[in-house]
């Protein structure tokens, strides 16, 4: 069998395995370099939500150039092309199903931080005012108690909440008169809410504002048949710890007397 005298071309399609011309490799490589420069340049520009689309488009073009020319898919048989593009179809199906789950699932409710995990903060409290119960404070305390305390202490304050069975020792029964670590006064309950009860499952709730802790204390006392009152020393100690000292003040009568005394001292009779 005679061989043709015509030399075989580097890019001839007569060869079983196509040999890509070197100039094609050079152009593709140059295109990849240009696309890389564009990728870096666009990363410094703010196109909003289009940034991700632009980046994905450039990456897709670069991937196609590599696959078609460097990997030779452009010159492969038809069956290989079908296999390759079918893989992208399955990828699109996978991404589509995943996206439908992410896009249409219900938004979960935001997690509310547990007040027992927070630290004490906020401005000093007016202890002289907050140590006295008011309907507003009691109502606020009931809402806070329902949110933070009912699970252990129960809705009626008897220490029989849903979680009580698993706790040792058992939660405080607010209707009982014995066994109170800091006492049943407003200041005593305030200390328990603030510091917790060491050796028991009762955590500190210092993350609540001072007013909120006073509100809880007043509501807890509604479970008691006869609750003791705070002494002046109790209020003074609590004021020193978390409150603002009471501002000194004079009665109107005493203030008028003092003004008269000072005026008389500066204006002797006859002068």
Image: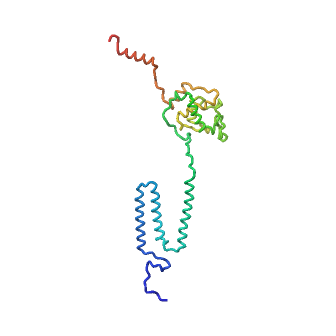
Q: Is residue 101 left or right of residue 248?
A: right
Can you say whether 45 is above or below 22 in the image? Answer: above
Q: Is residue 260 left or right of residue 143?
A: left
Measuring from the top left, give residue 161's x and y in whole percent: 65, 38
Q: Residue at 46% across / 65% down in the picture?
A: 61
Q: Residue at 53% across / 27% down in the picture?
A: 235
- What scheme was used to colour the molecule? rainbow
Measuring from the top left, give residue 81's x and y in whole percent: 53, 71
Report how many numbered discs are placed on residues in the image: 0
User: Which residue, as the protein is rendered here, is positioned at the far bottom?
Assistant: 1
Measuring from the top left, give residue 211's x and y in whole percent: 53, 33
Measuring from the top left, give residue 3's x and y in whole percent: 46, 87
Which image quadrant for residue 262?
Answer: top left
Can you say whether 135 is above or below 33 in the image? Answer: above
Can you say whether 191 is above or below 83 in the image? Answer: above
User: Which residue, as the protein is rendered here, is positioned at the far left?
Assistant: 271
Residue closest to the eye, 199 or 221: 221
Q: Residue at 45% across / 17% down in the picture?
A: 254
Q: Residue at 45% across / 86% down in the picture?
A: 4
Q: Quadrant of the C terminus?
A: top left
Residue closest to the eye, 205 or 26: 26
Residue closest to the eye, 5 or 99: 99
Which image quadrant for residue 156?
Answer: top right
Can you say whether 195 is above or below 57 in the image? Answer: above
User: Which residue, as the protein is rendered here, is positioned at the far top?
Assistant: 270
């Amino acid at each position: 069998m005679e061989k043709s005298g015509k030399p075989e071309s580097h890019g001839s399609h007569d060869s079983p395995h196509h040999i890509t011309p070197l100039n094609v490799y050079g152009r593709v490589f140059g295109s990849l370099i240009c696309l890389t420069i564009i990728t870096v340049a666009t990363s410094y520009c703010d196109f909003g939500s289009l940034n991700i689309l632009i980046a994905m488009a450039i990456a897709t073009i670069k991937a196609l150039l590599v696959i078609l020319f460097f990997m030779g898919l452009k010159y492969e048989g038809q069956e290989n092309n079908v296999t390759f593009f079918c893989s992208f179809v399955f990828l699109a199906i996978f991404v589509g199903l995943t996206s439908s789950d992410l896009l249409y699932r219900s938004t979960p409710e935001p997690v509310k931080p547990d007040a027992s995990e927070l630290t004490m903060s906020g401005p000093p409290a007016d202890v002289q005012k907050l140590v006295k119960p008011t309907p507003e404070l009691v109502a606020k305390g009931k809402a806070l108690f329902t949110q933070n305390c009912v699970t252990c202490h129960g809705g009626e304050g008897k220490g029989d909440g849903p979680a009580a069975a698993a706790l040792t020792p058992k939660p405080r029964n607010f209707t009982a008169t014995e066994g109170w670590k800091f006492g049943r006064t407003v200041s005593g309950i305030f200390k328990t809410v603030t510091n917790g009860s060491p050796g028991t499952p009762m955590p500190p709730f210092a993350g609540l504002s001072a007013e909120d802790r006073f509100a809880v204390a007043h509501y807890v006392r509604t479970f008691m048949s006869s609750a003791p009152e705070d002494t002046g020393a109790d209020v003074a100690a609590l004021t020193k710890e978390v409150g603002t000292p009471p501002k000194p003040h004079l009665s109107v009568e005493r203030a008028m007397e003092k003004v008269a005394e000072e005026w008389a001292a500066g204006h002797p009779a006859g002068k």
